[in-house]
Image (cartoon, coloured by chain):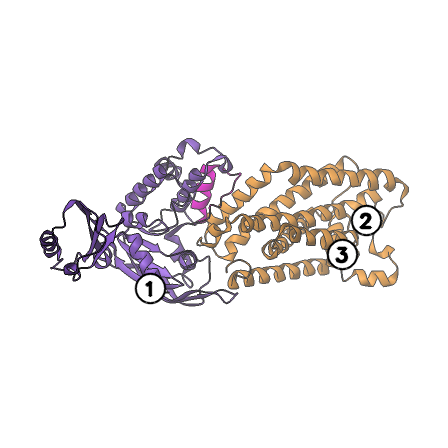
Amino acid sequence: MSSIISIQQLNKVYDSGFVALKDVNLEIKKGEIFALLGPNGAGKTTLISTICGIVNPSGGTITAGGHNVVTQYRAARNIIGLVPQEISTDSFETVEATVAFSRGLFGKPANPQYVEKILRQLSLWEKRNSKIMALSGGMKRRVMIAKALSHEPDILFLDEPTAGVDVDLRRDMWEMVRGLRENGATIILTTHYIEEAEEMADRIGVINKGQIVLVEEKDALMQKLGKRELTLQLQTPLTELPAELNGFALELAKDGHELVYRFDSQSEHTGIAELLKQLGQQGIDFKDLSTSQSSLEEIFVNLVRDSK
Amino acid sequence: MNFYAIKAIYKFEMARTFRTLMQSIASPVLSTSLYFIVFGAAIGSRMGDIDGVSYGAFIIPGLMMLALLSESVSNAAFGIFFPKFSGTIYEVLSAPVSFVEVVCGYVGAAASKSIMLGILILITARFFVDYEILHPIWMLSFLVLTAVTFSLFGFILGILSNNFQQLQVVPLLVITPLTFLGGSFYSISMLPPLWQTITLFNPVVYLISGFRWSFYGVSDVNIGMSVGMTLLFMLICISIIWWIFKTGYRLRQ
């Protein structure tokens, strides 16, 4: 699939001298959900803000839909919708008026039917005549999304869309994002919640200290970096591992009640059969066993640690 | 040109005006009425005519300018400062608009509000004094030109201000003294020669003089000079705004 956003050699140095982005190269494919992960201050928001025109780049080029975001900013921004991290709204405006305002600002003629459709989708229709300051935090977040969708963008940026949002609303938002993708939109989201990326994303990019550390298909990433663990619950606790088991990547846990075996799920030869055979020979009995795959969170923590 | 954006910003700003109708309209009208009561009715009756115009009528253009200048500057400054302060500016910055649309929207709304206010003061004055307008077209042109120019100036102040205090410094410490000393309440020919010369460095003199000419056909300075100075100031303001949007100074990091 072709790229809808193309970032080349992007640099951003703030006036204070802080290097927020360093030689960032990134391609976002049309129609995908791309999750940008990174610790606080890694440059996620700066990257998004630079694409959307809120921050001037110090060097490099960005195109959105083939339009340079600096020299052809009108064409580029026409197709972009942004939901920033901070909830900033015009407190005294009504929900419907603020969404209509956003639509106009992005150069689209008024379309009450479309605005109604978005407000209904986001469960805001009942609140359309309420002033924004009278809404709850989660409702305000939805208003921000409605504003970003008001001009029917092809690309939607969601900067930490579910920060401070309850579980129900989070599920609703995930549904909504999937629905948007089905209608052909490309979605780029940043998040702290790794489960969110795991749940939603087609591809994952990890940014740390202003540099893209990794970009990978989510499934491939999980498989490539994913380590599996086999946990055996022992009948009788062990104080130390028998020397015969030294060849295995084993560890005792829970005061010797559990035996943990790490293996690579990708390899042909996981070594599980041999391990179990050896255990049988050593007379080590177990009452239960389970396997688990390391989560994206662990992968992420390891990546960020490695790049330090 | 993104006309929908201009319309959206203009509508948004005007809605804000009508939400705060009391402080936007009522308070300037009230203070102007007080000026007329004090200077027009109470003191004015004991003052001689200036250039053949009764004192009460003489101060009308000056009072209108006083309100027009300070309201244009503070309206436009607040209009752009508040989104910066609350963070909603992100939307304008990420929208497909150039400085032309942003200025037309914000400055257009601030100027419209000032013009409405000026006309309202003119109507209010009718209750206190009789006056005539010799050149109504010129009067309206001056009104519009001044409102737009000083709204542009206020817009710059709004972008440059870092806090609410800075926002009020210029209207309070610069505009008000310049207007009072710019001949709102007197003809500059009444000043000693040295002060007459110094006064000519006050740009507001040209505004008030030209505006008064449109009412009564008398002026302290040449009318062409008045128009020229105002246009020059407007051009300077537009250039500064163009530069701000080009470089992103105080707008984009």
Q: Amino acid at mark 2?
A: Phe
Residue wearing tag 2: B185
Kind of residue at disc 1: Asp
Mark 2 against mark 1, which lies toward the viewer? Answer: 1
The chain ID associated with circle 3 is: B
Indicate left or right for A296 with A114 as reference. left
- Mark drawn on residue B224: none
Q: For the residues carrying marks 1 and 3, which lies nearer the camera in this image?
A: 1
Q: Secondary structure at mark 1?
A: helix
Q: Residues within 10 Å of mark 2 (few under 14, many from 20)?
A: some
Indicate yes or no whether the magenta region holds residue A99: yes
Viewer-closest of A266 and B77: A266
Q: Which residue is mark 3?
A: B205
Residue B231 spot, x, y in % from top left: 65, 59
How far from the left and from the top, in percent, is residue A35?
A: 32, 53
- Mark 1 chain: A
B48 left or right, relative to A175: right
Q: Nearer the viewer, residue A11 or B102?
A: A11
Chain A tint as drawn: purple
Q: Who's the residue at 14% across and 50% down the image?
A: A284
Looking at the image, which residue is at 64% across and 42% down?
Answer: B116
Residues shaded magenta: A87-106
Residue where numbered disc 1 is placed:
A306
Tell me the crowding category of disc 3: few under 14, some 14 to 19, or many 20 or more residues within 10 angstroms, Cα based: many
